[in-house]
Image (cartoon, rainbow, N blue to C red):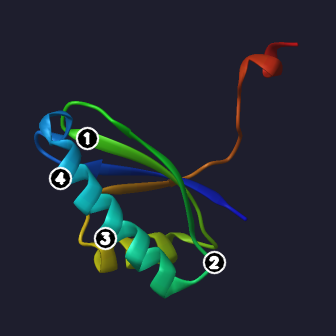
Amino acid sequence: MPQFVIEREVPGAANLTDAQWREIAQKSVQALKEMGPEIRWLQSYVTGDKVYCVYFAPDEATIKDHARRAGVPANRVSAVRRLLDPASAA
């Protein structure tokens, strides 16, 4: 299944409390359950004012539908074309 990186602009993201992140994650998981197995959330990285999420989904439209249902922004959706890691250097 195609992999995507989603950039979400969330002012003050790094300062949100655990309880706030739990609420956001619960909304996301609920939207995922409603949508079925065609979309999967792998993980997210929180920076200052942005959150970068990694998802598996059939297409960009599915990612945007999830964002709408979960009530979170999807400011930039990028399809992963290649994965590199330290093993790539060998």
- In this rendering, the answer to whether 89 lies above or below 11 is above
- In this rendering, the answer to whether 6 lies above or below 88 is below
Which amino acid does the dot numbered 2 rest on?
A: Glu
Q: CA distance from mark 2 to mark 3?
A: 17 Å
Callout in the foreground (2, 4): 4
Q: CA distance from mark 4 to mark 3?
A: 11 Å
Q: CA distance from mark 3 to mark 1?
A: 18 Å
- The residue that disc 4 covers is 20
Which amino acid does the dot numbered 1 rest on?
A: Lys
**Res. 38 mark:** 2
- Rendered residue at 37%/68% (across/down): 28
Callout in the foreground (3, 1): 3
Quadrant holding the N terminus: bottom right
- The residue that disc 1 covers is 50
Query: Residue 27 placed where, x, y %?
Result: 31, 70
Which amino acid does the dot numbered 4 rest on?
A: Gln
Left or right of 80 on screen, residue 1: right
Quadrant holding the C terminus: top right
Q: Earlier in the sequence, mark 4 or mark 1?
A: 4
Query: Residue 24 placed where, x, y %?
Result: 26, 60
| Other-residue count near label 2 (Cα within 10 Å), few / some / many at <14 / 14–19 / ≥20 | few
| Other-residue count near label 4 (Cα within 10 Å), few / some / many at <14 / 14–19 / ≥20 | few
Q: CA distance from mark 4 to mark 1?
A: 15 Å
Left or right of 4 on screen, residue 67: left
Query: Residue 77 placed where, x, y %?
Result: 43, 57
